[in-house]
Amino acid sequence: MAEEEEDLGGVETSFEELAKRAEDVEEEDDDDVVMDLGRGDDKAEALVEKVVPPQANEFTCRNCFLVKHRSQLADKKKMLCRDCA
């Protein structure tokens, strides 16, 4: 029984050491995350998109502001699509 108590004491000490080490590791990880959030030049280039104006057979709904085909036009006066009418 005395051996078991010594083992438990050793486990408590090692748990405390592990908890302390885990806190140190978490603090180091936080610094790494902040560095990874920076924007690079290559990401800005990937976001460039060519915008095409609405075609003759399309309209922009005045409620949802989506560009849709003329076949989706429900109210010609209000310029509403079928989903919004």
Image: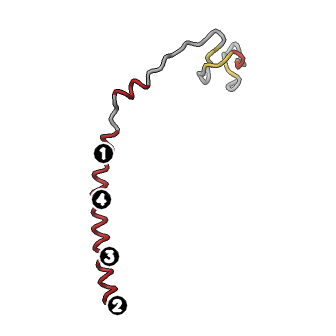
- Say which label, 1 or 2, has the lower sequence index: 2
Circle 4 crowding by C-alpha within 10 Å: few under 14, some 14–19, many from 20: few
- Contact flag, marks 4 and 1 (Cβ < 8 Å): no
- Residue type highlighted by circle 4: Glu
Circle 2 crowding by C-alpha within 10 Å: few under 14, some 14–19, many from 20: few
x and y percentages locating residue 8 in the rendered image: 33, 80
Q: Which mark is residue 23?
A: 4
Circle 4 sits in a helix, a strand or a loop, which is it? helix
User: Which residue occupies 70% across, 17% down?
Assistant: 73
User: Which residue occupies 63% across, 14% down?
Assistant: 59
Circle 3 crowding by C-alpha within 10 Å: few under 14, some 14–19, many from 20: few
User: Which residue occupies 67% across, 19% down?
Assistant: 80
In the visual, does 2 lie left or right of 56? left
- Residue type highlighted by circle 2: Met
x and y percentages locating residue 18 in the rendered image: 30, 66
- Say which label, 1 or 3, has the lower sequence index: 3
Circle 3 sits in a helix, a strand or a loop, which is it? helix
Circle 1 crowding by C-alpha within 10 Å: few under 14, some 14–19, many from 20: few
Q: Which residue is mark 3?
A: 11
Q: Which residue is mark 2?
A: 1
Alpha carbon separation for disc pair 4 and 3: 18 Å
